């Protein structure tokens, strides 16, 4: 067994341990989050360092175990990074706007769609109180309700500023250890859908009027003929010609509707 190899190759490990202790002592007085972050970084340095010992005793087994732990840690970190990249790609490619605020209504994160919807860049949104960045009381009230009740809610809002659009808002609470720590907004732009629905209602109303007018005339002339005008040789032919014209009008209208359905 080569004792000198122990002293030479384990010295970097002891250096890392000293670094961890120094970081622990310093950041314990500042912030727990920073503490955990720096300890994690220091540990990653330890496990990234592969121990090599020329020995056959228990120390070699310990080195082998630490090397396996380092490999597993490295694989796990790579897996997490890949998953984060996948989530980020999904987050940025969504058609819906995604906006996340913390418990103080400060904007934590937004995706590209939110920037396009409100015509505001991400740098002007993230880190600011919601009402400071997007001055809309309706959206702010939804966020406040979710943060207060911790329950999912949704509604449809017509916004006039900063853009004039119609949105369906789905708001969900974000929990941390059972306590509401934020709110997630999913914003669906319904402007075009509502515009098409209005066009459809207007179209149906116009078609109904165009169908009802000739049908009313045909019905009226039929009743007149059945009540005795059928024997009136001077007028019955004129009534029948008018009814024929209305029938052709109805036929053209039906053809137009069929053509429109094919176009759609």
Image (tube, rainbow, N blue to C red):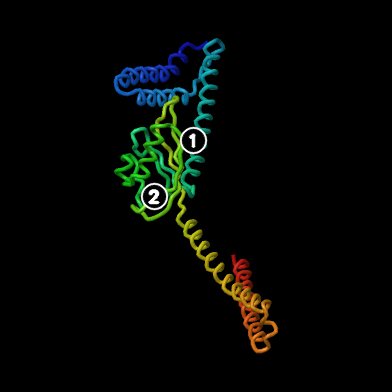
Q: Residue 229: where, in percent of width, then height?
A: 66, 82
Residue drawn at point x = 49 percent, y = 56 percent: 193
Residue drawn at point x = 43 percent, y = 27 percent: 176
Residue drawn at point x = 59 percent, y = 69 percent: 260
Q: Quadrant of the C terminus?
A: bottom right
Between 62 and 101, the residue placed more toward the observer is 101
Q: Residues within 10 Å of mark 2 (few under 14, many from 20)?
A: some
- Write down the residue under mark 1: 81
Quarter of the image for residue 220 reads bottom right
> Which is closer to the viewer, label 1 or label 2?
2
Q: Residue furthest bottom?
A: 234
Looking at the image, tell me whether mark 1 or mark 2 is earlier in sequence order: 1
- Write down the residue under mark 2: 115
In this picture, residue 155 sits left or right of residue 137: right
Quarter of the image for residue 11 reads top left
- 202 relative to 74, above or below: below
Between 181 and 64, the residue placed more toward the observer is 181
Helix or strand or loop: what does disc 2 sit on? Answer: helix
Q: Are marks 1 and 2 in contact (CB under 8 Å)?
A: no
The numbered mark at residue 184 is none
Q: Residue 147: where, in percent of width, then height?
A: 39, 33
- 237 relative to 170, above or below: below
In this picture, residue 29 sits left or right of residue 40: left
Distance of mark 1 from mark 2, alpha carbons?
Answer: 25 Å
- 148 relative to 213, above or below: above
Q: Residue furthest front?
A: 228
Q: Residue 159: where, in percent of width, then height?
A: 37, 51
- 15 relative to 216, above or below: above
Residue drawn at point x = 36 percent, y = 45 percent: 138
Q: Residue 214: where, in percent of width, then height?
A: 59, 75
């Amino acid at each position: 067994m080569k004792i000198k190899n122990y002293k030479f190759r384990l010295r970097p490990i002891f250096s890392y341990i000293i670094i961890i202790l120094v970081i622990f002592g310093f950041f314990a007085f500042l912030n727990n989050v920073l503490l955990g972050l720096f300890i994690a970084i220091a540990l990653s340095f330890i496990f990234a360092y592969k121990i090599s010992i020329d020995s056959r005793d228990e120390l070699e087994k310990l080195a082998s175990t630490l090397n396996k732990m380092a490999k597993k840690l490295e694989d796990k970190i790579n897996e997490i990074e890949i998953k984060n990249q996948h989530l980020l790609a999904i987050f940025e490619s969504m058609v819906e706007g995604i906006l996340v605020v913390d418990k103080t209504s400060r904007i934590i994160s937004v995706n590209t769609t939110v920037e396009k919807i409100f015509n505001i860049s991400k740098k002007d949104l993230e880190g600011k109180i919601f009402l400071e960045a997007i001055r809309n009381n309706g959206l702010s009230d939804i966020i406040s309700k979710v943060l207060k009740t911790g329950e999912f809610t949704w509604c449809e809002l017509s916004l006039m500023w900063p853009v004039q659009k119609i949105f369906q808002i789905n708001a969900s609470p974000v929990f941390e250890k059972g306590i509401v720590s934020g709110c997630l907004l999913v914003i669906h732009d319904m402007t075009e859908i509502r515009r098409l629905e209005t066009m459809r209602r207007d179209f149906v109303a116009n078609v109904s009027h165009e169908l009802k007018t000739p049908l009313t005339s045909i019905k009226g002339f039929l009743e007149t003929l059945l009540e005795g005008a059928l024997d009136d040789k001077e007028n019955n032919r004129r009534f029948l010609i008018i009814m024929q014209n209305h029938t052709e009008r109805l036929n053209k209208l039906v053809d137009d509707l069929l053509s429109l359905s094919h176009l759609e």
